Image: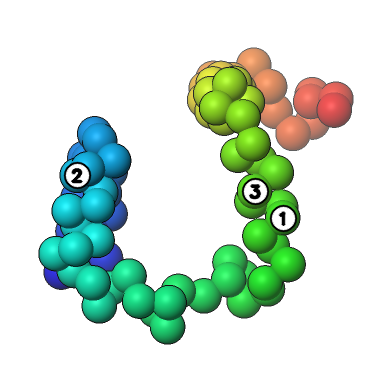
Amino acid sequence: MTHQELFLALYQSSTESEVEALLKKYPAIFEDANWYPLGGNASNYGVIENQQSSSIEKLTNSIDAILTHKFHKSGVITSTTAHY
């Protein structure tokens, strides 16, 4: 199974049971030895975990990112007009 196939299979899983079935079907992929800290830095766990503490926060952040992207593409907000 390629990385893309694995991603699509996980992405298209709509239940916990479907994800568990993938874990059982491809146990070698999910061995601890195949997983590394993001950026090679084990302390990045806290950064990632903090951003996923609330499902509402994830939803809000994703909507914000989409809107910001659309504004940048439309020219309404540019790097010279944006004031953060």
Q: Which residue is mark 1?
A: 46
* Quadrant of the snapshot with the N terminus: bottom left
Q: Is residue 64 above or below residue 13?
A: above
Amino acid type shown at disc 3:
Glu
- Mark in the foreground, 1 or 2: 2
Above/below status of 80 relative to 48: above
Q: Residue at x 42, y 83 (%)?
A: 33
The mark found on residue 49 in the picture is: 3
Q: CA distance from mark 1 to mark 2?
A: 28 Å
Pick out the residue farthest to the bottom. 33
Whole-Å distance between the Cαs marked 3 and 1? 5 Å
Farthest right residue in view: 83
Q: Tell how many labels.
A: 3
- The secondary structure type at the circle numbered 3 is helix
Rendered location of residue 21, percent (x, y): 17, 53
- Residue 41: quadrant of the picture: bottom right
Q: Nearer the viewer, mark 3 or mark 2?
A: 2
User: Is 21 left or right of 71, judged from the image as shown?
Assistant: left
First-in-chain label (1 vs 2): 2
The answer to which of marks 3 and 2 sits earlier in the sequence is: 2
Find residue 76 and report its horizontal and vertical position in percent: 64, 16
Q: Which mark is residue 57?
A: none
Q: Which residue is mark 2?
A: 18
Q: Nearer the viewer, residue 84 or 64?
A: 64
Residue 54: % across, % down: 62, 29
Above/below status of 38 relative to 74: below
Pick the front one: 43 or 40? 43
Q: Residues within 10 Å of mark 2 (few under 14, many from 20)?
A: some
Q: Amino acid at mark 2?
A: Glu
